Image: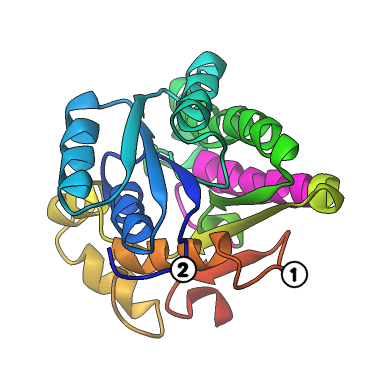
Amino acid sequence: MNSDLLNGKVVLVTGASSGIGAAAARVFAREGAAVVLAARREERLAALVEELTAKGAEARYAVCDVTDPGDAARAVRTAVTAYGRLDGAFNNAGVGGDRTPLHLMSDDVYDTVMDVNVRGVWNCLRHEIAAMLPHGGGAIVNNSSVAGLVAIPAAAPYVAAKHAVIGLTRAAADEYARQGVRVNAVAPGTTRSEITEDWFRRNPGLERTVNAMTPQNRTAEPEEIAAAAAWLLSDRCPFLTGTVLPVDGGFVNQ
């Protein structure tokens, strides 16, 4: 481990078993953090912790379904028990749902997308903030999306959920600023992950079409989103709270 952006900090990452979450675990550990990884897939978490500790990092994991408040509490408690405090959290766990017109969308898809993407962040925020307050504060980053800033077609529940994540971010930032807790969000554009790779495989030409809508004309790598989150969690931006940082190759700037 050879950097110090997060040196000495204890950081929780949800949705850490793949994609942006797994990339964040690696980036945060490389930047000097002790990481606590939370997700539902224990085998992947265990393998990632083994990988990180083999490189000299401090890492633990907690099996966690963020829609369960008890699981969210246990993930935070894992960090506090192991390291004595919680300095930062990246609330990354989320699902995309179906790409279906609104009038054809099922109630089950709506419920799942809202439950994971909104209630999951809500559950985590409550327990993370409670753990940070006795130690003078901390920093939290919620993973929204460009869909939290603009509409995208055939994804109404996802758009609604990611707008709600931004609302929670701003509300929490305002409420806890004087108590030393900073709360920000990242809004990724199209980012390479298991979900996006599956979309691209099932829809030949989709990646080219999506990239053409982005000024940088490419798909982001998950490490690029993780790097932005690491900066927001660090002490390099102490006066930054309640903001939403697009990491989207210029998509929402058009």
**Residue 181 image offset from top left, x and y in percent:** 72, 49
**Residue 179 image offset from top left, x and y in percent:** 82, 47
Secondary structure mostly seen in magenta is helix
Residue occupied by mark 2 = 5
Q: Which mark is residue 29?
A: none
Say which residue appears at 43% left-offset and 65% top-offset: 189
Say which residue appears at 58% left-offset and 47% top-offset: 87
Asked if marks 2 and 1 touch (Cβ < 8 Å), the reply is no
Quadrant including the N terminus: bottom left
In the image shown, does 117 or 86 lie closer to the viewer? 86
Quadrant including the C terminus: bottom right
Residue occupied by mark 1 = 239
Q: What residue type is disc 2 on? A: Leu
Q: Residues within 10 Å of mark 1 (few under 14, many from 20)?
A: few
**Residue 218 visible to the viewer:** yes
- Distance from the alpha carbon under mark 2 to that under mark 1: 16 Å
142 w.r.t. 127: above or below: below
Image: magenta residue range:
150-173
Total residue callouts: 2
